[in-house]
Image (cartoon, helix red, strand yellow):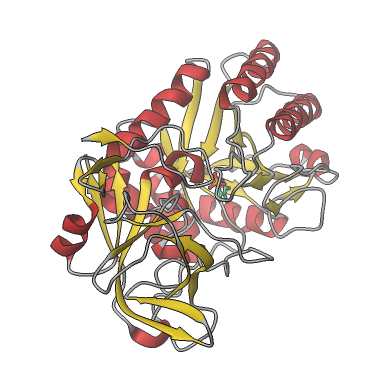
Amino acid sequence: MSDWEPRLGVELEDVVFGVERGELSIAGEPASRIKDAHGGALYAYDGVAVIRRVERLRRAIDDDVGIKYAVKANPYGPLLELLRGAVQGFDVASITEIEAALRAGAAPTDLSLAGPGKSDALLEAAVAHGVVISVESPHEIDRLVSLARERGAAPRILLRINPSFSLRGSGMHMGGIGSPFGIDVEEAPAVLANLPGELDFRGLHVFCGSQCLSSEALIEAHRNVFAMARELGHTAGRPLGALNVGAGFGVPYFPGDRPVDVEAVLGHFNDEAEALRAAHPGIDIELELGRWLVAEAGVYLCTVVDRKVSRGETFLITDGGMHHHLAASGNLGQVVKRNYPICVANRLDAERDEKVNVVGPLCTPLDVLARGVMLSRAAIGDTIAIFQSGAYGPTASPSGFLGHLPAGERLLR
Ligand SMILES: *Cc1c(COP(=O)(O)O)cnc(C)c1O
C-alpha cells in the first residue's frame, strides 16, 4: 500500500489515505469493501486522523488550556467515545447531545451547554447533571434562578457574550451584529453587576464564527476576545473562573483554500492566555472546536446506481445525496455551489477525463453532490468518495426528506 497524494485541489494535512491496486483505502481498508460491508452509502471516519488532529492541537497550546469538542459537528457515538479520552470536555446543545456525551463516558461536569431558547426540560437536565450552562439572555438568568431555588443547587454558568467585533473571513458571521446568541457586550457590565447570588458565575463564553481559513483574522479575533475578557473581568470586580473561546478554525473544501496555520494562531493564543492568567489566577481557559477536529477524517462513500446522458451532460446517479450530505450539495450555507473534493474511489489510477454531474436519488434538482466535475470514467457499481466529510454530515442533513435509507456511519482505526 502506498500513501495517496490526493489530487483534490485542496491540501489535506493530518490524514493519510492509502491506495492499493488503484483503490482508495481508509485506515487501511479499501473503500468499496467498507461500503459493501455496510450495504449502502455511509460515512467512514479515520480514528487515527482524529487523534492526530487533537495531538497536533495539544502540542501547539499550553498544557493548561483545555480543548472542548463541539458535539454538533459530529455526534456519532464511537467518535465521541474516541474523543472523550483525548479532549477535556464536550460542548453540547440539547438533551440528545447531553445523553450522547454521557453515553460516551464523559463526566457531566465536563460538559458545557450553549444555544438560544433552551427549554425548561433542557435547563432542568443541565442543572441536574451539573453541566456548565452558557446563559444567552436575561430571561434565561431568571429561569435559572427559579430552578436554583427549587432545587437548592447553584447552577454553574458562563455568560455568553455577543461581541462588538466579528471573525473576519468566517463562513458564518456571529458577532458585531444583532444576534440570538449571547448577551450584547454593551449590556454585559450591567448583567454582571446584578448577577443573582443563586448562580455560580464561572466566567465568559465567546463564539464569534465558524469555518475561518484566515490565520490573521483568527489571531485578531482571539486578541479581541481576550481584550474583552480583561475588560469585563475588570468590570465584574472579581477574578474570572473560566473563559471559553470558540476557535472558529476552518478546513479547506475548495480549490485555492489553504489550511489554517494553527501553530501560528495558537502561539498568539498562548501569549494572550498567559497575560489573562496573570490577572485572573487559576482561570480555566478553553478552546472549543468542532469541524477542525473531525472534518478531514471523514469520507462519504456512495455507489453509482445509474449513468445517463441528458442534453449532452453526463449524470452519475448514486444511492447517496443531499439527504445524507447536505453540505456537499451546497445547500448548507453556500451561496454558489462549489464541489467538495471527490473521486471515483476504485479508479484512482485512471485519468480524470470525463466531465460529470454526480447526483442523488431525490426528486429535486437541489440533490447534486458535484456539478461539472472531472472524474475518471465511472461504471455502475463504482464507489464515489467525497472528502472533508467528517463534520456537519448526517445530523446536518434532511434525512427524512423523501424517505430513503439514512446514511450509515463507521469508525475505522
Ligand atoms: C458550532 C459551535 C462550535 C463549533 O464550531 P466549529 O466551527 O465546528 O468549530 C463551537 N461552539 C459553539 C458555541 C458552537 O455553536
Q: Is residue 3 left or right of residue 279?
A: left
Q: Is residue 228 left or right of residue 8?
A: right
Pick whichever, 317 or 115, lies toward us. 317
Q: Position of residue 149 (x, y in %)?
A: 53, 52
At horizontal 17% and vertical 69% (from top left) the residue drawn is 39
Pick whichever, 390 or 19, lies toward us. 19
Q: Position of residue 101 (x, y in %)?
A: 34, 48
| Residue 100 sits above or below residue 193 on the image | below
Name the quadrant containing residue 16.
top left
Give the residue at the far top of this rendering: 278
Q: Position of residue 89 (x, y in %)?
A: 41, 36
Is residue 196 in sight in this rendering? no
Is residue 110 in sight in this rendering? yes
Q: Is residue 220 left or right of residue 46?
A: right
The N terminus, quarter of image:
top left
At horizontal 46% and vertical 33% (from top left) the residue drawn is 13
Name the quadrant containing residue 344.
bottom left
At horizontal 50% and vertical 57% (from top left) the residue drawn is 123
| Residue 360 sits above or below residue 184 on the image | below
Pick whichever, 179 or 158, lies toward us. 179
Q: Position of residue 120 (x, y in %)?
A: 51, 65
At horizontal 57% and vertical 65% (from top left) the residue drawn is 332
Name the quadrant containing residue 124.
bottom left
Pick whichever, 299 or 219, lies toward us. 299
